[in-house]
Image: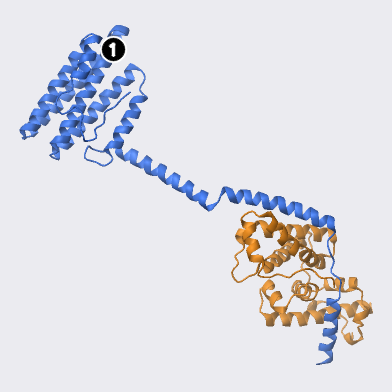
Chain colours: A blue, B orange
Amino acid sequence: MTPEVQRLERLAERLRSVDAVMPSPGAKIRGWNLVLAAVNQSASVRSRSHPVRRLVLVAVAAAVLLVGGAVAASADSLPDSALYPLKSVVENARGALAFSPSDKFAYHLDLARTRLTEAEAMLARHRLDLASQALGGLNDQLNEAALVVQAEQLSDPALAASLDNRLVQAIATHDLQLAGLQGQVTNPAAIAAITQARDRAAQALQTAAKPASDGAKLSTSAKGPGTGASATPRPTPKH
Amino acid sequence: MQPLGKAASDDDRPLIERVRRGDQDAARILYERYFDRIYNYVYARLGRAEDAEDLAIDTMTRSLTRLDLFQDQGVAFSSWVYRIAHNATIDHYRRQGKAILVPLESATLPVSADPSDLAVDQLSNDDLREALRALTDEQQQVLILRFFQDLTAAQAARIMGKSVGAVQALQHRALGSLERVLHGRTNN
């Protein structure tokens, strides 16, 4: 061992013998209190962003997006679509939010247009069963609109007249569409269903013109073949 | 030298997991295990009890609340705590506006000084501590870890992120530098 190494070894030993400087008890307690507060706060923050909790939040968000997307997609769905039952739910919800006579009337006319569109699509796909149900739905909605007009004849004749005028125009438009549709199909059953739908649409006008007591009876008797209870889901708005 | 308590060990791992789950008792055990050591380490670097207390508390707070940053892969919790303490010390120097000490090799020393004249046994603890603070950052660190903290070369190497050989070489140079500083002081 060289003299230099020996000197450095002695110095190293001397360093080892230097007393450790210890913190005061007060400083240690103060330190622990501060550390404990920070640890608790940190644990609180971690618990808020716990992986399981984050996973649940992500799942809920995904579910909301999924449901939201399905609801949005169902708006344009057709009776042969898996999303069609959801469309019925959404339509019922809309109906529940229509409070004034004008809103209810507009709501039923809107659904009548929707049913007619569905009927056209189903006829194009040769789904006569679903087309018949859609046509039945069209007549139901027109009849519901007619009942709104009827109900307003005594309480607000001016509004009833206005709504009746709109109903006439809507039925005329629908009849034109149905007539065009009738000319395109060759299936006798389809032709019969369209004919029946046109007849029932015309009856809705009579319902609107009748006194309220009679109209109520018509509202239930107006449902003909193909519009009654069915195993196949079909939007049946309620409010 | 007074005992500084149990050195870092594998026992830290289950405690760390418990702290991560919010266990205060586990945090207390780790605090007790490391606070004195860290205080001693920082005090050796700064020489002021108040600053050493603050930095030791800051180090322990960061160590026990940022466990999400600690990856128990290749580096022990003890090494991580020392590194935090070291960085806190460097930050403290910067905040105080003190330049990191220049390497002793470039400092002016009496060329004719004969280190063999140095009577190390007659040096006071304060002399040694003060002389140590005149060394470079790395030299201080290696001497404090090896001789004040009584860590092995391998433990010091892990804390400093160096190989054992590099630590041993650094330690040798640091002792030589310290000897020259002490000799220069005793001659002045």
Q: Is residue B28 left or right of residue A105?
A: right
* Rendered position, A176 above or below B173: above
Using the rendered image of the protein, determine whether residue A76 is visible from the camera's viewpoint. Answer: no
Q: Nearer the viewer, residue A209 or B97?
A: A209
Give the image location of residue B52, x and y in percent: 80, 61
Q: Nearer the viewer, residue A139 or A234?
A: A234
> Residue drawn at (74%, 52%), measured in percent from left and top?
A34
Task: Tell me the quadrant of the picture where the C terminus of chain A can be found.
Answer: top left
Give the image location of residue A139, x and y in percent: 19, 24
* Rendered position, A182 above or below B56: above
Q: Secondary structure at mark 1?
A: helix
Q: Quadrant of residue B141?
A: bottom right
> Which amino acid, mark 1?
Ala
> Residue drawn at (34%, 38%), measured in percent from left and top?
A71
**Which chain's residue wears label 1?**
A
Q: Quadrant of residue B168?
A: bottom right
- Disc 1: CA contacts within 10 A as few (<14), some (14-19) or many (>=20): many
Q: Quadrant of residue B178?
A: bottom right
Q: Which residue is mark 1?
A: A151
Q: Is residue A58 left or right of residue A29?
A: left
Give the image location of residue B161, x and y in percent: 66, 73
Q: Residue furthest bottom?
A: A1
Using the rendered image of the protein, determine whether residue A146 is visible from the camera's viewpoint. Answer: yes
Task: Tell me the quadrant of the picture where the N terminus of chain A can be found.
Answer: bottom right
* Rendered position, A118 above or below A142: below
